[in-house]
Image (cartoon, rainbow, N blue to C red):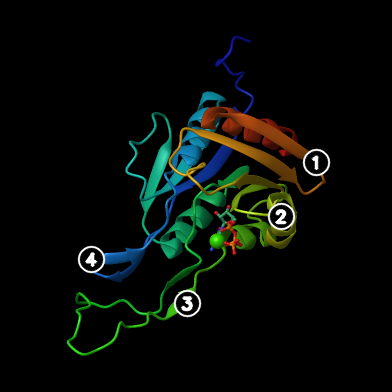
Amino acid sequence: LARGVQAPDLAGRHVVVSAGGTREPLDPVRYLGNRSSGKQGYALARTAAARGARVTLVEANTGLPDPAGVDVVHVGTAVQLREAVLKAAADADAVVMAAAVADFRPAAYAEGKIKKKDGVEAPTVPLVRNPDILAEISADRARPGQVIVGFAAETDNVLANGREKLRRKGCDLLVVNEVGEGRTFGSEENEAVVLAADGAETPVPHGPKEALADTVWDLVDPRLR
Ligand code: CTP
Ligand code: CA
């Protein structure tokens, strides 16, 4: 096959991809967020569609245009992302969690803007844990044999942390990349290692996010039943 032309090996499959980063509102004008651009998730959605899959893309705060031929669900918070992913995963063959989900959200939402007060120190903001969507869908699969993929960005002990995270989350594949100092976030390129629950390790050299996306689908495909 010519470069960039893919066999429709995912024809007849439904895949779900989450992309972007959740925002957890604090008051009407503020939120807790993260630096995920959503580009890797969009590359996964585009490549899956090019390989013939029906694709549901659950998008959080990317500002990116909807890819052609993909069903897009727009969400804001981790709780909304969980709802949308669980709903779409009900009949999915594979779910790829590329979104950066906030681990915590403010315990309370202030209906009015939080104001400074003279003579009062900075407030502390109590946080509560968000649901762990990847762990939940891995432990309680909507379909037998559903393939579940997570992403992990690590700053140090990348492989050891990745192995431990793969085990803890219970997913089939974990794409681990090293972050920090301008790497990965917002960039057009990525470099990663894909760890599999069966022990396989697939290094993906530095290159376009599409190439990493195709490697993920290459690893998902033989695991589909
Ligand atoms: N994830 C999720 N729900 C969460 C947090 C993370 O589904 N509440 C998913 C992400 O989409 C990603 C994977 O879990 O696919 C790993 O995210 P990461 O932040 O690396 O894992 P955590 O378990 O939150 O670990 P850490 O304490 O290192 O942030
Ligand atoms: Ca996290």
- Residue 63 location, x and y as percent? 32, 43
Camera-side residue of 27 and 45: 27
Q: Quadrant of residue 126?
A: bottom left
Tell me the SS state at disc 2: helix
- Disc 2: CA contacts within 10 A as few (<14), some (14-19) or many (>=20): many
Q: Amino acid at mark 3?
A: Val
Calculate the distance from the C-alpha at mark 4 to the C-alpha at mark 3: 20 Å
Horizontal relation, residue 74 to residue 152: left or right:
left
Q: Determine the quadrant in which ligand 1 lies.
A: bottom right
Q: Which residue is mark 1?
A: 200
> Which comes before the other along the chain, label 4 or label 2?
4
Q: Which mark is residue 166?
A: 2
> Which comes before the other along the chain, label 3 or label 1?
3
- Residue 125 location, x and y as percent? 37, 79
The residue at the far left in this view is 118
Calculate the distance from the C-alpha at mark 1 to the C-alpha at mark 2: 12 Å
- Compared with 185, 32 (above or below) is below
Tell me the SS state at disc 4: loop
- Disc 3: CA contacts within 10 A as few (<14), some (14-19) or many (>=20): few
Q: Amino acid at mark 2?
A: Leu
Q: Which residue is mark 3?
A: 128
- Compared with 159, 118 (above or below) is below
> Which comes before the other along the chain, label 3 or label 2?
3
Horizontal relation, residue 55 to residue 110: left or right:
right
- Residue 220 location, x and y as percent? 68, 37
Q: Which residue is mark 4?
A: 29
Q: Please indicate, yes or no, whether residue 92 appears anywhere in the rendered image.
A: no
- Disc 1: CA contacts within 10 A as few (<14), some (14-19) or many (>=20): few
